[in-house]
Amino acid sequence: MGWAIHLHLVSAMAWIGGAFFMFVLGVSLRDKQDQEAVYPRIGPIYGYFETGALLVLLLTGFTMIYNNGLLTILFSNITNEVIDALRIKLYIVGVIVVLTVIHMVISMRSLHKEKTPLQRFLSKASSMGIFLLNLVVLHYAMVLRDIL
């Protein structure tokens, strides 16, 4: 598990750190012209970077679950503090993955053109959802660490 946990932690820092950066950027760039100048340039770079971090998180997370014999336990009726916290964390990760796909599809389709009101709403809502749910996942990671 040694290599997997280290890659998992570095990827989590990249994923959550990137989300914080984009959140601060979004809050601080109020002028529409500034947003139009920055997002088309930084968005694709950020998107590819974050996609890579998410894929590493999913791969290393699965590897740690599998190597520790937790895969079959997760799909059983067994409940305890560790398994319950891990299940909740994984459910939230699933929602984050769905929100990420929604956000990226909208972002890529509207990269160099004006977003429709629905696209703007879904893009901002999915982005905020990802940001907030990252904090919840981080909480459950700390809960698991405290238990173990």
Image (spheres, rainbow, N blue to C red):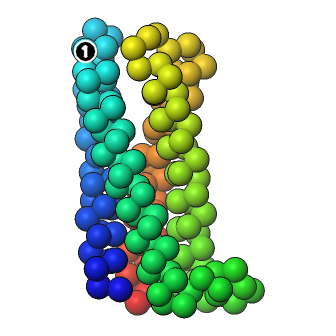
In the image, residue 96 above or below residue 148: above
Seen from the viewer's position, the closer of residues 78 and 30 is 78
Q: In which quarter of the image is residue 102?
A: top right
The answer to whether one can see residue 62 in this image is yes
Q: In this view, does 46 lie to the left or right of 66?
A: left
Please identify the quadrant where the N terminus is shown: bottom left
Please identify the quadrant where the C terminus is shown: bottom left
Residue 58: give x, y in percent of width and height. 46, 64
In the image, residue 14 above or below residue 142: above
Residue 19: give x, y in percent of width and height. 33, 45
Please, what secondary structure does the residue beneath circle 1 have?
helix
The answer to whether one can see residue 19 in this image is no
In the image, residue 33 above or below residue 41: above
In the image, residue 117 above or below residue 84: above
Q: Residue at x 69, y 80 (%)?
A: 75
Seen from the viewer's position, the closer of residues 29 and 69 is 69
Q: Is residue 49 left or right of residue 64?
A: left
Q: Is residue 52 left or right of residue 85?
A: left
Q: What residue type is labelled 1?
A: Ala
Residue 79: give x, y in percent of width and height. 66, 87
Q: Which residue is drawn at 32% across and 30% down?
A: 43
Q: Which residue is drawn at 53% across and 59% down?
A: 93
Q: Which residue lies furthest to the right in this view?
A: 77
Q: Residue at x 34, y 77 (%)?
A: 4
Residue 59: give x, y in percent of width and height. 44, 67
Q: Name the residue under label 1.
A: 37
Circle 1 Cα neighbour tier, 10 Å, few/some/many (<14 / 14–19 / ≥20)? few
